[in-house]
Image: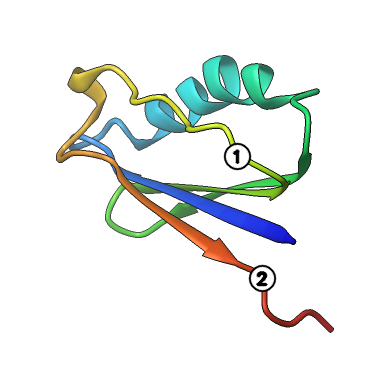
Amino acid sequence: MTLAQMWEARAAAGRAAELSDWVREFVLPVLRGSAGLVRTELFAAAGDRVLLITWWEGEPLLVADPPAVLLARPVHRWGFTSEHVE
């Protein structure tokens, strides 16, 4: 069974690039090579939002919270189970 974990953060005003850099520098290295990790994707969106989706075979790792100074609000997290892929 494949599980997807979504991690979404809204950056403090003008700090989206720093938040995205934080994910690349601190989160992705921790995830790389983790047992069960299938894939990661990092997105940027309007409104200074940064989204990380990870796919897992088995129990996923939780992504850490960034430094509070980078955030406009608390991080949101969702877990999903894959039901169909084409």
The answer to which image quadrant residue 27 occupies is: top right
38 or 81, which lies in front? 81
Residue at 73% across, 82% down: 84
Please state the total of marks drawn on the protein image. Answer: 2
Query: Which residue type carries mark 2?
Result: Ser
Q: Is mark 1 on a helix, strand or loop?
A: loop
Whether residue 57 is situated above or below residue 15 in the rendered picture = below
Provide residue 13's location: percent of width, then percent of height.
18, 37
Provide residue 6's location: percent of width, then percent of height.
48, 52
Q: Is residue 15 left or right of residue 40?
A: left
Q: In which quarter of the image is the C terminus?
A: bottom right
Provide the residue designation for mark 2.
82
Label whose residue precedes the other's in the sequence (1 or 2): 1
Label 2 Cα neighbours within 10 Å, binned few <14 / some 14-19 / many ≥20:
few
Provide the residue designation for mark 1.
60
6 or 19, which lies in front? 6
Residue at 34% across, 22% down: 66
Residue at 63% across, 17% down: 30
Provide residue 31's location: percent of width, then percent of height.
66, 26
Residue projecting furthest to the right: 86
Residue at 48% across, 33% down: 62
Provide residue 51's location: percent of width, then percent of height.
46, 49
Query: Which residue type carries mark 1?
Result: Pro
Q: What element carries label 2?
A: loop
Name the image colouring. Answer: rainbow
